[in-house]
Image (cartoon, helix red, strand yellow):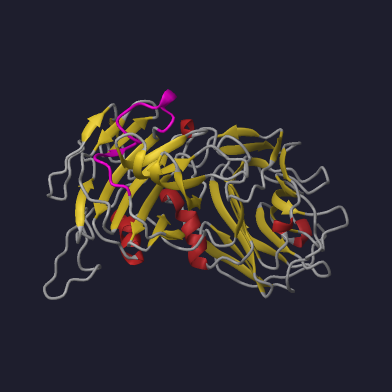
Amino acid sequence: MFEPPSREVTISGGDVTGQDFSASISNADGLVAYYPFNGNANDESGNGHDGTVLGTTLTSDRFGTPNSAYNFNGNDSRIDLGNPVDFESPLSFSGWFRLDAAAESQWNTLFMKSQYCSGFGVMYNANTDQSGRKFFRIYNSSCEGIAGTDVDYMVTYADWVHYTLVYDGVSLETYINGNLVGTHAYSSSILDEDQMWLGANGPDDRVNGYYHFTGDIDDVRIYDRALTSDEVLALCEEGGWECGGSTLDGLVAYYPFNGNANDESGNGHDGTVNGATLTSDRFGRDDVAYSFDGNNDYIEVPSDPGFTMSEISISAWIWLDRDIGNEQARIVNRQSTSGGLEAWGLEIFGNNYASSGPGNKLAFHANTGTDAANTISPTLLETGRWYHVVGTSDGIEARLYINGVLDITAPAPGSLDPNNNADIVIGKTGPQSNFYFPGIIDDIRIYNRALSETEVAELCEEGGWQGCGDAGISTYTLSGTVTD
């Protein structure tokens, strides 16, 4: 289980930098209200803006600490914060939230400063719209969103997310997990109604709790100034939480398997499930990964121009139920019926497959259409345990990572084949009915660029996973030609 790191206060003489001062209340300059929810909804900024709890219940925070966050039921629960700040001036709102799966198909209010729905605040639309997207909406009117203030982002249910909104009088900036994901010019007056609410858009119940938040909220901070990007990142990383990085850049498809095989990158590359069944993920959460029987289960994603790229990174979590034997097991790949020279993908090689020696070895291929680049790991994967596996190619070098550690490199013969228009298949070879995967696959990400070692490590450590950095092998170069 993830153990929360201790929180210390260090004050040094002379000039105090962001690294010299750290505490449960960081970036205190301009802090109007702070709600860590340590057993209550009191304001711990010292300004006395205590909240009133209405139907919410205490729960564990992102570190697993009991009674340190509030759960909102999505129907009638909310927290009344009173009127802590005048939103006519520059401001920042920061907080942690975790959506329950029950939040699907509804708007979820993070905060709203209003007497009903006229006012200013942020909601997350968990109901996929006609264009297949989910998004945050910044409201500033009578029940209607301002044009240009939607921020496309798909939240993974059950994962903690750090959200920050910064307004400097000229523009609105949205940060997710320390990353700037949206900027919108806006210099008009912000509506500043009386009370501020967490988890609801006002004092009156909407029909069927339509605007109420379903999930957990924690560590809410309100400032009367615009935070810098460094300050936003420092808030996200407080307590040792891993934030930042650029693992949203170049994301073509993302399959967290939250009850389905939908693409949550916002690009609409949804998969069709054929036989695979929902199961628990590496954190023990139900119905957020897919189990493949190794016989005829797979997931298919239709071909799309978005999958045509010169560079590539493929990231996935896998669990092997049994040894592969003398064949292969495909994790995710793109391969047509014409052969293997145009293919790319991640797979497991069995005993002596392609002269690879003993089986259960991770392999990655990223081919040009005229030449094949196949990278085979020297590491033997065990059955009955989770592995984070990543393959990258920038056209010059291919790399394989296991549990956040660089495992092996090999020369890459060039850019990926631009004429490959095959479907993407998870759990077996492309159009052929062979090389089925026996085990669990989860959290697949496909990028149109080569991730860095730091970014790969961030993906492995996402959610506080403690099994990273234990591949324990040496890196060497191996190249060869394999018929896929």
Name the residue located 71 percent from the left edge and 49 percent from the top edge: 330
Name the residue located 68 percent from the left edge and 42 percent from the top edge: 271
- Residue 53: which quarter of the image? top left
Q: Position of residue 109 (x, y in %)?
A: 39, 39
Q: Pick the quarter of the image with the N terminus.
A: top left
14 vs 248, left or right, is left
Q: Main secondary structure of the magenta part?
A: loop
402 vs 168, left or right, is right
Q: Position of residue 386 (x, y in %)?
A: 54, 46
396 vs 136, left or right, is right
- Bounds of the magenta span? 191-211
Is there any visible trace of residue 1 in the rendered image? no
Residue located farthest toward the top when viewing the structure as drawn = 208
Is there any visible trace of residue 174 in the rendered image? yes
Q: Position of residue 392 (x, y in %)?
A: 63, 64
Q: Is residue 317 magenta?
A: no
Count of numbered circles in the view: 0
Name the residue located 80 percent from the left edge and 53 percent from the top edge: 422
Q: Position of residue 390 (x, y in %)?
A: 59, 58
86 vs 320, left or right, is left
Q: Is residue 192 magenta?
A: yes
- Residue 142: which quarter of the image? top left
Q: Pick the quarter of the image with the C terminus.
A: bottom right
Pick the residue in front: 120 or 460: 120
- Tell me: residue 86, above or below residue 356: above
Pick the residue in front: 129 or 443: 129
Residue located farthest toward the right when viewing the structure as drawn = 338
Pick the residue in front: 186 or 76: 186
